[in-house]
Image (spheres, rainbow, N blue to C red):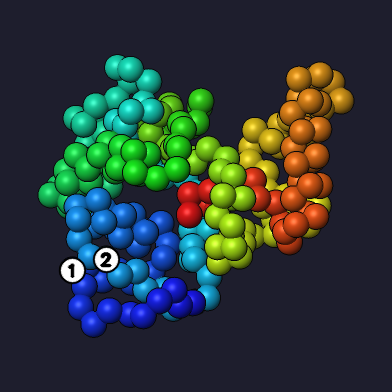
Amino acid sequence: MSHGEIPAEVDLLVLGAGAGGMAAALSGAVLGLDVLLVEKSDKVGGTTARSAGSAWLPNSRHSPPGSDSFEQALTYLRNAVGNRLNEARATAFLRAAPEVVALLEDNTALKLRAYPHHPDYLAELDGATLAGRVLEPEPFDASVLGGRFEDLQPPLPEFMLLGGMMVDRADIRDLMTATSDPAAFGRSLRLLARYAVDRLRHRRDTRLVMGNALV
């Protein structure tokens, strides 16, 4: 996929247009660097686009007030990883995590949210939390991408209904309770109506969730 001539020299060369590569490219651009992002395939997103799109980012602006801290998260990592933990890297990651969330949300259309209840994987360990560390992207309207929407790696078929409608856990809950909950019925009806309109113009839904929304 080519979008102009490749410059002979840049300040920052990033290989791979997954979440990590694009976050690195964004960081460089925000710092004023001349950035080149190179992707070997003809689609953007890599394995991120086919994933659930969740990220473990402790102590961010989305953590419930007073529920987390740098010390608490480091305690959890020490208990979870044990003597294999690289303290320097763990410390750097935990200090950068809140800044990464701010960088992404303040400089792109991406908006993240915390799961209302999502315990750490080893929730019984000291330092673990029950919510606030695992972030997911809010649904994203990809119609703003225009023709670039076709450059996005599609999600796994298992993440879509009716041949092209992406759904997240909230959508699934609404669809499963639509016959008993009027509010869920209304949300499900709007979801299906949007999908029907999108299929008149696109091969799949432009309402993106999970990894597709993150990309």
Q: Quadrant of residue 189?
A: top right
The crowding category of the residue bearing disc 2, from other C-alpha atoms within 10 Å (few below 14, some 14 to 19, many at least 20), is: some
Work out whether residue 124 can be spotted. Answer: no
Tell me the amino acid under the disc marked 2.
Val
Q: Are marks 2 and 1 in contact (CB under 8 Å)?
A: yes
Q: Position of residue 165 (x, y in %)?
A: 73, 50
Seen at 37% across and 20% down, the residue is: 64
Q: Position of residue 122 (x, y in %)?
A: 40, 37
Seen at 25% across and 51% down, the residue is: 30
The crowding category of the residue bearing disc 1, from other C-alpha atoms within 10 Å (few below 14, some 14 to 19, many at least 20), is: few
Asked if residue 122 is positioned above or below residue 38 in the image, the reply reads above
Tell me the amino acid under the disc marked 1.
Asp
Q: Position of residue 17 (x, y in %)?
A: 41, 65
Task: Residue 11: give its label.
Answer: 1
Seen at 81% across and 47% down, the residue is: 196
Residue carrying label 2: 35
